[in-house]
Amino acid sequence: MAKIKRTYNLSPMTVGLVRRLAEESHVAPTQDAVVEAAIQSLGRRVRDEEHARQFAACARDPEFQREMAEIGTEFEADDRAAWEVG
């Protein structure tokens, strides 16, 4: 994957932590890889939190619940056949 050179201002403590994670803990092969892994992890966490908020909203939405019940009823026979449950 092509990389893009960027410059960010980080605190000395953060720079030290990135260095230790790469050189002492070996969590990633380079300092750049440590930063990239941390950003990817943060991105997943933010995405998962947003999904959780959306799912919670659906759980409180009577119209959504009604629609899901209808879909479940409509496909129940096909689901049972696919699962070979009878």
Image (spheres, helix red, strand yellow):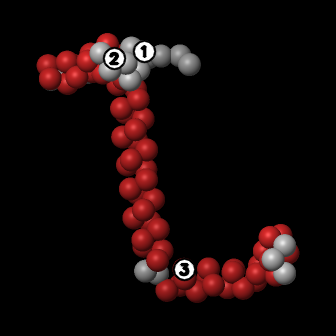
Label placed on residue 22: 2
Mark 3 vs mark 2: in front: 2
Amino acid type at mark 3: Phe
Cα–Cα gap, marks 1 and 3: 46 Å
In this view, the residue in front, 2 or 38, is 38
- Residue at the spot of label 3: 64
**Image location (x, y in percent) of residue 47:** 43, 50
Other-residue count near label 1 (Cα within 10 Å), few / some / many at <14 / 14–19 / ≥20 = few
Amino acid type at mark 2: Ala
The answer to whether residue 5 shows anywhere in this view is: no
The answer to whether 32 appears left or right of 78 in the picture is left
Mark 1 vs mark 3: in front: 1
Label placed on residue 29: 1
In this view, the residue in front, 20 or 34, is 20
In contact (CB < 8 Å): disc 2 and disc 1: yes
Earlier-in-chain disc, 1 versus 3: 1
In contact (CB < 8 Å): disc 3 and disc 2: no
Other-residue count near label 3 (Cα within 10 Å), few / some / many at <14 / 14–19 / ≥20 = few
**Residue at screen point 42% across, 71% down:** 56
Earlier-in-chain disc, 2 versus 1: 2
The answer to whether 64 appears left or right of 83 in the picture is left
The image shows residue 37, relative to residue 6, as above or below, that is below
**Residue at screen point 39% across, 14% down:** 30
**Residue at screen point 80% across, 70% down:** 83
Helix, strand or loop at mark 1:
loop
**Image location (x, y in percent) of residue 20:** 26, 18
Amino acid type at mark 1: Pro
The image shows residue 78, relative to residue 12, as above or below, that is below
Quadrant in the picture for residue 31? top left
Earlier-in-chain disc, 3 versus 2: 2
The image shows residue 53, relative to residue 7, as above or below, that is below
Label placed on residue 85: none
